Each structure stands twice: as C-alpha cells, then as structure tokens.
Image: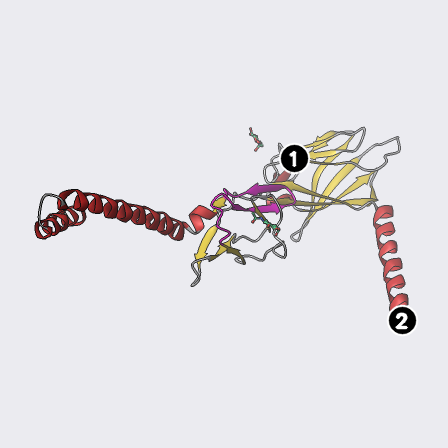
C-alpha cells in the first residue's frame, strides 16, 4: 500500500514538473559544433517595439541580439556576424556555433522578460571509433574494446545489438567467442545527441586468424604426407620387381630428404 502510494505520488510529482515545464515553455536543443540553431517564442503579441535575446552561461549574462526603433544591435563579440533576429516572429538564429554558445536563452519583448526560455547544448560530433582487440589466455576468446565516453552500441553481423553490452562505460569490453564462422563480424557505434558513427567491422577471421591458419596448414601437411606415402608405396612396389630392397630404401630416403630439407 505504501509502495503504491509512493508510486502514485511520484507519478503526480513528475506530471506536475512536466506540466510546469510545458507552461514555462522550456525548450531544449542540442546542436553540433559549427552548426546552426533557431529559437522562437511560442507567441508574440503585436505591437512589438523592442526585442532583446539574452544568453546566460556560467560566466555571465550578455545580450545576444537586440532590436528596437534604432534597428539591430549585436553588442557581444561572441554573437557578431553569426546571429540574426526576425523582428516579426521573434526568432533568433545563430550559425557557426561554438561550445561557448551553450547556455540559457531568454527573450524580452517590449522590455518584459517572457516566461519561456531555451536551453542550448553545443557538442562535437562523435568521431569514428576503432575497435581494439585484446587477446585472452584462451585462444577461442577475445575482448573487444570501444573506448570512448559517448554512448556505445555493439552489434554482430546479424545486426543484433549484443545483449547486456548496451551503454558501455569508457574502456569497457565485450567478450567474443570463436563461433568457427570467419565471416561473423562485430561493430561498435558511438552516439551522442547530434551524431552517430560506426567503426569498421572486425571479422572473426581477424580475431582468431592463428587458429584458423593452423587448421589449414595442418590439413595441407596431412594431405602432402598422404600423397608422399602413396608415391613411396607405388615406387617401392614397382621397383621391387627389378631390384633388391636395400637400394630402394636408400633412394626413397633421398627423395624424402630432398623434399623436406633442400
Ligand atoms: C561561418 O561558417 C561558414 C562555413 O561553415 C564560413 O564560410 C563563414 O565564414 C563563417 N562565419 C563566421 C563569421 O565565422
Ligand atoms: C548475434 O547476437 C545475437 C544476440 O546476442 C545472437 O543471438 C546471435 O547468435 C549472434 N549471431 C552471431 C552470428 O554471432
């Protein structure tokens, strides 16, 4: 009963927060470094005589752009040449974004600060990850690492996200076992709010190449030995009808010796 009450009250508190956010018109956006972002007030009642967009960061509050009877003004260097304002809709547009544009944006219309505000986070695009291979003491098990701080998604060749390996922490590994299918592969994808990049695949044949190569070499050597044995027998049976056994064995040893050591 207590648990149920707790759940309901949590739900109610969450709902209140969501509604408050909606009423206040909090608007969050993530934009990539060098990209463009626009914010618009939900409504703007004419007549409009002045608009001021302000940027609030951890350092200070500055005017991003203002408009009034005297026209447009961009007092702060951070917003010069890259900021535009539509005085009809109140929309601000900032291009060539840098990390320093991150922060809260508020708008004053006719010198009155509006309840609605905007939160901007400028972030770098993720870079293409490279899978690092870590051998283990077991020749049929390797660890793969996709060591970055963004969200990491591992997949195998079927395209299935590998179970229990979502949202890996930086430097965390997945364990891959040899399934004896050299065409199986693994990828890791980095993802943040503005971008997503996938590594080149790592194939099983690259992970367990030595054991596979070992098998193939073993098969070839086995086949060669069998062939030699057959030749040896044929020669022996053929020659036996003419000669004594002794020189034949010498010749055969010579053939084998030449084959392997010369
Ligand atoms: C903004 O970026 C564009 C290309 O991305 C460049 O041509 C332009 O010069 C930049 N403007 C400023 C003010 O940095
Ligand atoms: C790929 O991953 C899925 C989910 O873990 C698994 O069921 C499947 O057998 C894997 N396939 C291969 C070829 O490794």
The residues bearing labels 1 and 2 have C-alpha atoms spaced at a distance of: 49 Å
Residue projecting furthest to the front: 241
Is residue 139 magenta-colored? no
Q: Position of residue 130 (x, y in %)?
A: 48, 47
Q: What secondary structure is marked by label 2?
A: helix
Query: In this rendering, is residue 87 above or below 181?
Result: above
Is residue 184 magenta-colored? yes
Q: Is residue 59 left or right of residue 39?
A: left
Q: What secondary structure is marked by label 1?
A: loop
Query: In this rendering, is residue 148 above or below 157?
Result: below
Q: Position of residue 89 (x, y in %)?
A: 80, 30
Q: Does label 2 point to a residue whose CB lies under 8 Å from ligand 2? A: no
Numbered mark located on residue 36 in the image: 1
Task: Between residue 158 and residue 111, name the one nearer to us.
Answer: 158
Residue projecting furthest to the bottom: 2
Numbered mark located on residue 204 in the image: none
Q: Going 85% across and 32% down the picture, which residue do you hit? A: 48
Magenta span? 178-201
């Amino acid at each position: 009963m207590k648990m149920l009450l707790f759940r309901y009250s949590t739900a109610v508190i969450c709902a209140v927060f969501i509604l408050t956010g909606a009423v206040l018109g909090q608007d969050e956006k993530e934009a990539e470094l060098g990209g463009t972002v626009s914010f618009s007030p939900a409504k703007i009642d004419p007549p409009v005589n002045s608009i001021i967009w302000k940027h609030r960061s951890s350092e200070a509050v500055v005017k991003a752009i203002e408009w009034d009877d005297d026209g447009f003004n961009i007092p702060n260097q951070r917003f010069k040449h890259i900021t535009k304002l539509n005085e009809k809709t109140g929309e601000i547009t900032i291009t060539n974004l840098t990390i320093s544009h991150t922060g809260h944006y508020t708008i004053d219309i006719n010198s009155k600060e509006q309840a609605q505000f905007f939160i901007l986070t400028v972030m770098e695009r993720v870079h293409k990850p490279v899978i690092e291979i870590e051998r283990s003491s077991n020749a049929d098990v390797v660890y793969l690492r996709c060591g970055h701080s963004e969200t990491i998604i591992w997949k195998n060749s079927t395209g299935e996200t590998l179970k229990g390996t979502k949202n890996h922490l930086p430097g965390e590994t997945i364990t891959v076992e040899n399934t004896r299918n050299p065409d199986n592969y693994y990828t890791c994808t980095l993802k943040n709010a503005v971008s997503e990049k996938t590594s080149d695949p790592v194939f099983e044949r690259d992970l367990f190449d030595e054991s596979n190569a070992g098998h193939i070499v073993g098969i070839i050597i086995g086949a060669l030995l069998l062939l030699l044995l057959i030749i040896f027998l044929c020669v022996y049976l053929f020659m036996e009808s003419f000669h004594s056994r002794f020189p034949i064995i010498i010749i055969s040893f010579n053939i084998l010796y030449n084959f392997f050591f010369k």
